[in-house]
Structures are given as C-alpha cells and as structure tokens.
Amino acid sequence: MNHFLLRTTIASAALLCGTTTASAQSTVNLYGLIDLSIGSNKAPGGTRLRDVDSGKMTTSYLGFSATEDLGSGLSAVVKMEHFLRADTGEAGRFGGDTFWARTAHVGLSSKAAGTVTLGRNTTPLFVATLRMNAFGDSFGYSPSIRHFFTSGTVTGDTGWSDSILYTSPRWGGFSFGLIGALAEGSNGRNWGMNAGYADGPVAATVTLQSVKKDGTAAVADTRTWQLGGSYDFGAAKLFGQYGRVKNETVVNQYRITEIGAKVPVGAGAVLAQWGQIKPDTGAKRDTLSLGYDHNLSKRTDVYAVAMRDHVAGLSTGLGYALGVRHRF
C-alpha cells in the first residue's frame, strides 16, 4: 500500500510539472479565526473547572497563504498556519506544540490534474470527520472529533509532518485524496486515502488511515477506517459516521458510531450530535452535545453549547460554554 501511494503521488507531481509555462500573477493573504468562550467543564471522573477558554468550537489560529499563477492552469501554492490560545496569548494548542502545527506546505495545483503539497498537511481522516458531523471541527464539543482524536483511539495528529498530499479535482461530485508521511530513522510510515461524493443535498466519504509515527516520534500503530454521510432536507441536515480503529500495539479495537443534526433557526442553527466508543476491551463512552449557533454576520457568530460525556465506571462529565467566534 505504501509503495502504491508513493508511486501515485510521484506520478501526479510529474503530471503537474509537465504543464508549467511562464509565470503570471501572485497573491498573498493573511487570515485567521479567534474563538473565545466562558463556561464550565468537568471531564468524566474529574473536577469542575470554570474558565475563559480559547477554541471550544474552532481552535483559534493565524494563517498565511500565497499563490502564483504559472500559466496553463498551473499554480504554485503555499500555506502556513499556526494555532494559538487567545485566552492567554500563547502559541500552540498546548505547551510545546509545534508552531506551525495546523499546516505548513508548498506545492503545485492544476485545475485538470489536482494538487500536490509537501510539508505538514492536514489528514483526510480529520477533514472527513469534521465535515460529517453537526459541530464541525470542535475539539471542545463535537463527539465525533473527540472520539476519533482525543479519546485514546486514533494515534497521530490531525496534521502529519514530512508528508506528501495529493488531492484530485472533482468529477461530477466525486473526488479522492492520498497522503503519506515518510519514515525518519527508526520511526514508521503513515499513509491514508479517502474518496468522497458531494452533489446537491447528499454527501458521502470513505477514509482509510494507518499510523506509526506522530511528527518525528514513534507512536502506537493504529489502522482506521471510517464511513460518513450527510443529507440536507432543507428543514434539517442529518449526519452519520461509523468507524473502527484497531490499535495493533496494545491489541484493542474501537467501534465508533456518530449521528447528528443541524436545524436552521432564524439567523443560526440548532446543533445536536451523539456518539459512542465501544472498545473490545475497556470502558464504553457515550457523548451528547446540544447547542445553538447564531450568525451576527458572515464572519462573526455567537454560540451556546452543552455536553454530557459519560465513561462507564466514572462520574459523568458535564460542560457548557457561551462564546463568540470571528473569522478574518
């Protein structure tokens, strides 16, 4: 599988390079998002903490991007984005986080052949997970994001260092992607692939991923597959996900089920998402989040969210937040 991924990516890059002509225009953009909230949180089995927090609905970040038109439908692309904790002004999602942890890559993009980028790339599994649940990329309140990425199931980060990512064009709603993170020293390789369809009210994804390292450090070997889908009825948009994560290092398997809905109300929407982790060995986890997100403008929204998080054998976790989010 790794050899197939590498050959496909190299072939795609060669195809892109073959269409190069004289350079034309270039653009540079500065953008970002700040998300701050006040609330109360108690993890399962933990103690209650009341605080002002950053990134409960979307992790705050600052980004730079650049594109250069090389002609004949080919462009050079660059993107660098770093997370930040706006409540304290500190960089990163946590102490010691890589500065450009969100993404840092350069590549070539062709309207006909797709896009190849080298560097630190966001994984297809993370993108599929955030697209197919009502709370998007919320690490604070999305059961889907929490169950796949912060509950001891999938190993590796949401972005992979030392990686090559290929994203295809869309053909009648269909698209696919391939990603590989090369080994360094004695660390293993990562690879992933996804295919998706989105047209009108219906969308669907299938994603596979294998992880043996996180950054430059070796981690527990995990293999993940995930199916996702959504359907927009107009009066409500429904979401569903099912996945399995096999941890080959500790010999355990996790079944993850997620269902949700987004119901437009006025200038905003009511959000609901439920999810469950059912391991072969260990405690079952059930998480339910409810909220309302209200758009004040195209770039600014306010939200109110509550979550119940239960792990068998531990006291139930409860949390809520009132927040504001601004994109620029």
Image (tube, rainbow, N blue to C red):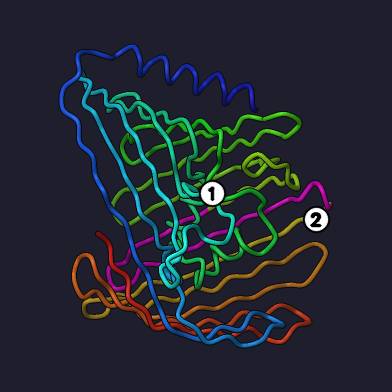
Mark 2 is on which residue type?
Answer: Asn
The total of numbered circles placed on residues is 2
Q: Could you tell me which secondary element the residue under label 2 belongs to?
A: strand
Residue 79, compared with residue 300, is above or below; it is above
**Residue 170, quarter of picture:** top left
Pick the front one: 35 or 177:
35
Q: Could you tell me which secondary element the residue under label 1 belongs to?
A: loop
**Residue 139: % across, % down:** 51, 66
Pick the front one: 224 or 188:
188
Q: Which residue is mark 1?
A: 98
The verdict on residue 198 being magenta is no
Most extreme residue toward the left, as rendered? 25
Left or right: 251 with respect to 120?
right
Residue 134 visible in the displayed image: no
Q: Is there a contact, CB below 8 Å, between mark 1 and mark 2?
A: no
**Residue 255, quarter of picture:** bottom right
Q: Which residues are magenta?
A: 228-250
Query: Given this view, does label 1 or label 2 mark the residue nearer the observer?
Result: 1
**Residue 247: % across, % down:** 76, 50
Q: Which residue is mark 2?
A: 252
Label 1 crowd (10 A; few <14 / some 14-19 / many >=20)? some
Residue 57, compared with residue 106, is above or below; it is below
Most extreme residue toward the front, as rendered? 89
